[in-house]
Each structure stands twice: as structure tokens, then as C-alpha cells.
Amino acid sequence: MTSPYDLDLGKNPANHQPLTPLTYLERAAKVFPAHVAIVHGDARVTYAEFWRRSVKLASALSKRGIGKGDTVSVMLSNTPPMLEAHFGVPMVKAVLHSLNTRLDAAILAFQLDHAESKVLIVDREFSNVVREALTIAKAKPLVIDFDDPDYGDDAPYPKGNRVGSLDYQDFVASGDEGFSWSMPDDEWDAISLNYTSGTTGNPKGVVYHHRGAALMAYANTVHAGMGRHPVYLWTLPMFHCNGWCFPWTLAVTGGTHVCLRWVRAKAMYDAIADHGVTHLCGAPIVMSTLINAPAGDKRDFPQTVTFNTAAAPPPEAVLSGMADVGFAVTHLYGLTETYGPAVVNEWLADWDDLPKGERTAKKARQGVRYAALEGLSVRDPETMQPTPADGETIGEVMFRGNIVMKGYLKNEEATNAAFAGGWFHSGDLGVMHPDGYIQLKDRSKDIIISGGENISSIEVEDTLYKHPDVLSAAVVAKPDPKWGETPCAFVELRPGADTKAEDIIAWCRQHLARFKCPRYVTFVELPKTSTGKIQKFKLRELAKDV
């Protein structure tokens, strides 16, 4: 039967527009034109200027033939060009691909090829590795160099030589500020591309759409408690899930981005005190850096700063230490495939009065779904039936909703497997508590989260097996007070081999990005099942005492 509400009440331009975060910046520029949008060193960029530069970037890209479905890759730090790219690139219906600045040349080359990059914007901090990647890659993008005037005299290393044929500032200047930028044809159109950490080989390209980015921006505003004109310090890399979508989020309420190239204690405390920072996001390593900073690096500030953290739940001592120096920690959970955090440990006031042990148990849970997520469940991946909400029965954590990825680029098989049964399969194992809060118990793919970076144990093991003296190897996560987790390798050597732990670590550093290399190597006979499978649960226990 046809409902009367469906008759003659169709969509039209007056009542239906595609959701996109681009309109948030347009509104902010009109409503708060003189408000400071970006702080970078001595530079102050208003919303009017932020909008103008984003439009000019879009225009410059358009003049070079960049349009719908083209990939614009960026190898940038948390600097103004990265923020401009989050708006300027999708303004021409192109797709923003943010490269992880910590990766090695081979993986960068793979991503440039897989994404079919047409343009590559490079910060000169990363010139050397990008130059090497371009010699490997088949893709031949237009390369544009960004020479940051606020690079700093205390830089850990000097800028590399230019790689490209154009300068970023000149490129933007070539654009027309009156350019007619484009809304997406459909809110389902791709807005960005982010690569996961590879497990058994090359990483998968996660595609976000305009709808998800727009809804995530609203959700972050709610769950981070952002009122009008928040001040956000960039410690989380913007290449991580598009900075958990916060580059788009701050435009909703006219917030200020405080850029930070290197995460250092004094620079963070100075920014918080001098600019009135109200929010930041980061991995456990950032909390550790703040808590353990030398007294001379710390600054007093009157405001309480909201610190959003993901990965493993912070220990009680860390939470107490953060509170002592002026931070309120919010624990989040999500994946690249969910635009970053899609689960929040929604803290109830009554829990503050619980005994310490019960309070700690509550804090160890990942939490409940974001407002923009329609479904969060723990299910049997074979039957797709929900597990009992008893806090004990382990199943796979699954997501459903508008802040779940569009799919994996050029990988139909992986996309279909991820969405089997009408839910996104996270690969994480957990339980559902009676009150609806989930808690992770293990990672089915043995991903190690170190300093906010995902490290595949399989990738590290593959490197270890290539060492001529290694007979067998297994890598597990070792709890680490600074990094959250760190890779710990257990190795069986071939008979007669005299290789030392430092030799194994040096080997890994030759073949892996430095953050992926194990910091601990132990030579043991690996525990195995009767079928020869390595028993990693035993190694995880051993790793705690290594």
C-alpha cells in the first residue's frame, strides 16, 4: 500500500542536498570570517583566509586537469597545507590520500601506484624517502614541494632537497579565489583514501565517502564535548583516518587548529597555555610524554583539557597522572574502516563513587556506539548470531552504519568478506556486557598498537624469517608504559647459529619502518600445539616478563 506521505513529496534541490563537510568550512568563513582558524608558529590564519586558500587550491588543481575520482596524495605533517587539502581536494570531486609519514619507500610506492596518484604534495621533511619511493613507483604524479617557513631551528634533521617541479605556495597562488567549487554529485562519492597496515602483504585502501565524513564531524563535536570555538591541538597525525575526521569537525563550531609538527612535551605545554587549548587526541605515548615531562617543560593552565585517546585503555595511574596536570581523558575505540573512533566509553557519574577495582574495570571497557553509528554488536562470525550479553562469551566486534567505510579500493574479495552478513567485521574479539558496553579481549589478526601505530605481527615475522639464521619466529605485543604496546620477538635459531639480539634488531631496521621493529628479542624454543601451530597466548605471558 502506498503511503500518502510518498505522493508528490519527492526530493528536489530545495529539500535535499548531499551531505558533505565542505559546507561546514563555507559556513564558518561567512559566520566567523575574522576568527582564527589556524595557528602555526607565528602565523595566524582566519576562517576567511582558510576558505580562500582552500578554494584557490581547488582551482589550481582544476587547472591541472584534476577532477572527479582523481587521487591527490599528500606527504605532510600537521601543518596548514594538510588542513587546506582536506577541503581543497574534495572541492574538485577528487579524493585525498594521506600518506603515513613514517612508512618506508617500498610501501609508499605501492600506495602511489595502487591509488593511481595524479598529484603528490610533499613536505621537505620527507623529501628523501619520497624521492626513493618515486624511483620505485610506476605512477608519475605531479610533485609539489611544501617548504615550511616554521620548520624550526630545533628540527631533528635538516630539510631535504626539493623533489618536485612546483612550490606549494606558488601553486596555491596560481588558483582563482572566485573559482566555482563543486558539491559532490552524490554524498556516497569518495572523499578520501586511507591505507590500513598490511597483514600478510600489501595494505588495503579504505575509501571514505562525503556522507560519513559529514556525520563523523557532527559526532566528534558531540562526543568530544566541543562547544563554540574550541581550540584543538594537533598531536594526532592527520594521516591517521584523516585525523579521526577532526580537520572537518572543527569547522562545525568555528574551532581553532593549533598545528604541531613534532610531538614534544614543552611545545605541547606551551601551546596549551599560550593558546588556551581545550581539546586534543593522541595515543598513550602522548599521555606519557605529558605526564613525565621535566618540570621545566611543564606550564600551568587554568582550563581542563579534554584528551581523547584510543588503543588500549589507560591504566588508573596514567588517568590519575593526567588529571593531576589538568587533563580529562576520554577513551575511544575504532578502526580505519570506521573513520577512526566509533565507540566511546561513555562515563556515568555514578561510577566515580565505585571502589577502585570496580571503577578500573569500567574504564577498561571500550564502550558504546557513537551517535552517528547505527549498530555495534558482538557476534559469532560463522552464525552471525549475537553473543550473550554476559561479559564472558567472546565473539567478533561488528559495526553497522553510515560511518563505516565505502569499501576497500580495487579489492572486491576483501570488501565482501568485511561486510559478510550485513555487518562490518572488525577482526577484533570481545565481549558484550549486560549494560551494552563492549570490551575487547584479543585481536584476531594479532595487530600490535604501538604509539598509536598499527603494526602487523605477521609483517614483522615475515622479515624475521628472511634472516638466514632464523629457523622460526613469532611476534607478540609486550605491554609498554610509554608506547602502550611494543613488538616483542621470540626466535628459534638454526643449529650452530651465533646471532645476537642486536643483530636481529639491526636486520629488522634494514627491512622495516623503524617503529615496526621489535625492541625485545628472546631466543627460545617456541611453544607449539600438536599440529605445529605456535601458541601465541603463551608468548604473550612470557613477553610481560621480558
Image (cartoon, rainbow, N blue to C red):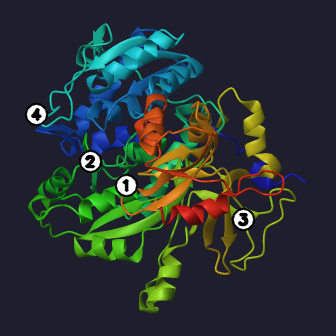
Mark 1–mark 3 Cα distance, whole angstroms, equals: 26 Å
Task: Answer few, some or many: residues within 10 Å of disc 2's Cα (few below 14, many 20 plus, some between 14 and 19).
Answer: some
Mark 2–mark 1 Cα distance, whole angstroms, equals: 10 Å
Mark 2: amino acid: Val
Front position among marks 2 and 3:
2
Residue of label 2: 263
Q: Position of residue 216 (x, y in %)?
A: 50, 50
Mark 1: amino acid: Gly
Left or right for 320, reference 137: left
Q: Position of residue 84 (x, y in %)?
A: 33, 31
Sequence-wise, which precedes: disc 2 or disc 1? 2
Residue of label 1: 282
Sequence-wise, which precedes: disc 1 or disc 3? 1
Left or right for 419, reference 513: right
Mark 4–mark 1 Cα distance, whole angstroms, equals: 25 Å
Mark 2–mark 4 Cα distance, whole angstroms, equals: 15 Å
Q: Which mark is drawn over residue 153?
A: 4
Task: Answer few, some or many: residues within 10 Å of disc 1's Cα (few below 14, many 20 plus, some between 14 and 19).
Answer: many
Mark 4: amino acid: Asp
Sequence-wise, which precedes: disc 2 or disc 3? 2
Sequence-wise, which precedes: disc 4 or disc 1? 4
In this view, which residue lies farthest toward the front?
496
Whether residue 206 appears in this view of the structure is no
**Contact flag, marks 1 and 3 (Cβ < 8 Å):** no
In this view, which residue lies farthest toward the right?
1
Mark 2–mark 3 Cα distance, whole angstroms, equals: 36 Å
Sequence-wise, which precedes: disc 3 or disc 4? 4
Q: Position of residue 141 (x, y in %)?
A: 45, 11
**Nearest to the observer: residue 294 or residue 407:** 294
Left or right for 276, reference 128: left
